[in-house]
Image: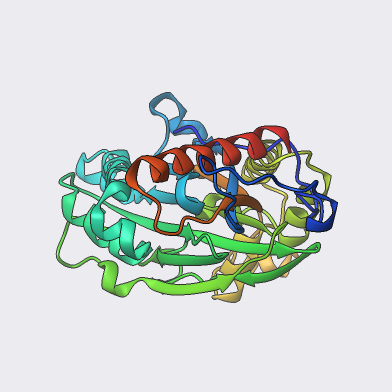
């Protein structure tokens, strides 16, 4: 699904001169002067690379991103084990994401901006057989990022070149994450990890399926973010590096290090020869990179319907202009 993007991962800066530098405003009974306010918005870049053996069918990950009303994105990673039962794992994750996107216009979601409620509604509407790990993140116009996650999709917030926030995976045991499912034995929205974090202009969000975080270290993420000219380029570079590591049998990946820490390793006789379990983990890789920006919008105080509509259209134009020209 398409997402709006910015052209540059830029540091915070003023978007308007100080009030004292504005020329005197001439009042008109047809265009009254209004106060302005700042609202947070997300500029979003995405990239998906399917598992090499699943590329012909597009892989089993799915995602969507939308920059309206602050911004929202979601990722679902279809559980591949369903293929052993002749079920296409991609069908569940794709329908779940399609339903999530469709419910953004739901009246309750418009009022609450609650990712857990969005997950509840999308899951209830999904009829495909299967299961998926999932993460949904929604940015309030005030700058608060709300997150609901089931399983091991990841999310990190980068501020001033450092990871200042990350979520922890949910799992039953190693390599068996929590998952939203068509079956009663699976998890539901009530099992989601729910949290929020207050963001600032210039903050970078990096989110992805486990195919990203199993194959790339935090320092590599920070390096790519610092070198990328925009969110699209950053998402693509992260996905490509994760894919490179995933097929490298000599790369000591985050996944192989975690496996060894859980007691999984090569046979004892190989250990005697100095061998250990290493290598990347081949998987679908989905990456979302988003940058927090602020836009100036007019205050609406009891305007009539026609005037309110005009201001809403102006706000939308400001957001689009800011994203296209930054």
Q: Is residue 198 above or below residue 60?
A: below
- The residue shown at (78%, 60%) is 219
- The residue shown at (56%, 61%) is 155
Quadrant into which the N terminus falls? top left
- The residue shown at (29%, 47%) is 105
In the rendered image, residue 321, in percent from the top left (x then y), is placed at 63, 34
Residue that extends furthest to the top in the rendered view of this protein: 56
Quarter assignment of residue 257: bottom right
Q: Is residue 18 left or right of residue 48?
A: right
Q: Is residue 81 above or below residue 108?
A: above
Quadrant into which the C terminus falls? top right
Does the rendering let one see residue 268? no
In the rendered image, residue 195, in percent from the top left (x then y), is placed at 47, 74
Q: Report the number of numbered marks.
A: 0
Q: Is residue 30 left or right of residue 326?
A: left
- The residue shown at (31%, 74%) is 191
Q: Nearer the viewer, residue 303 or 136?
A: 303
Q: Is residue 223 left or right of residue 296?
A: right
In the rendered image, residue 17, in percent from the top left (x then y), is placed at 81, 51
In the rendered image, residue 133, in percent from the top left (x then y), is placed at 38, 57
Q: Nearer the viewer, residue 69 or 250?
A: 69
Q: Is residue 43 left or right of residue 311?
A: right
Q: Nearer the viewer, residue 38 or 104?
A: 38
The colour scheme of the drawn protein is: rainbow
Quarter assignment of residue 90: top left
Does the rendering let one see residue 222? yes
């Amino acid at each position: 699904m398409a997402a709006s993007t910015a052209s540059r991962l830029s540091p915070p800066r003023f978007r308007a001169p100080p009030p004292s530098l504005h020329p005197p405003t001439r009042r008109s009974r047809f265009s009254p002067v209004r106060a302005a306010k700042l609202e947070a918005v997300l500029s979003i870049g995405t990239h998906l690379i399917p598992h090499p053996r699943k590329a012909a069918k597009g892989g089993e990950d799915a995602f969507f991103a939308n920059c309206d009303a602050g911004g929202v994105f979601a990722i679902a990673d279809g559980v591949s084990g369903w293929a052993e039962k002749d079920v296409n794992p991609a069908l569940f994750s794709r329908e779940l994401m399609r339903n999530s996107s469709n419910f953004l216009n739901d009246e309750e979601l418009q009022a609450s901006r609650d990712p857990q409620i969005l997950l509840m509604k999308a899951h209830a509407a999904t009829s495909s057989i299967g299961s998926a790990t999932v993460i949904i993140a929604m940015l309030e116009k005030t700058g608060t990022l709300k997150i609901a996650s089931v399983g091991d999709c990841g999310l990190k917030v980068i501020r001033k070149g450092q990871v200042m926030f990350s979520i922890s995976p949910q799992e039953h045991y190693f390599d068996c994450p929590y998952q939203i499912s068509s079956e009663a034995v699976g998890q539901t929205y009530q099992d989601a990890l729910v949290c929020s974090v207050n963001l600032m202009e210039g903050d970078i969000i990096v989110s992805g399926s486990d195919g990203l975080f199993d194959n790339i270290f935090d320092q590599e993420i920070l390096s790519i973010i610092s070198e990328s000219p925009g969110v699209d380029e950053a998402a693509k570079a992260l996905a490509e590096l994760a894919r490179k590591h995933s097929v490298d049998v000599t790369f000591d990946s985050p996944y192989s290090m975690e496996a060894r820490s859980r007691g999984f390793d090569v046979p004892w006789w190989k250990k005697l020869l100095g061998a250990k379990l290493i290598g990347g983990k081949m998987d679908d890789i989905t990456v979302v990179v988003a940058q927090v920006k602020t836009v100036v919008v007019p205050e609406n105080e009891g305007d009539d319907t026609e005037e309110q509509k005009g201001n809403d259209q102006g706000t939308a134009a400001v957001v689009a202009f800011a994203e296209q020209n930054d």
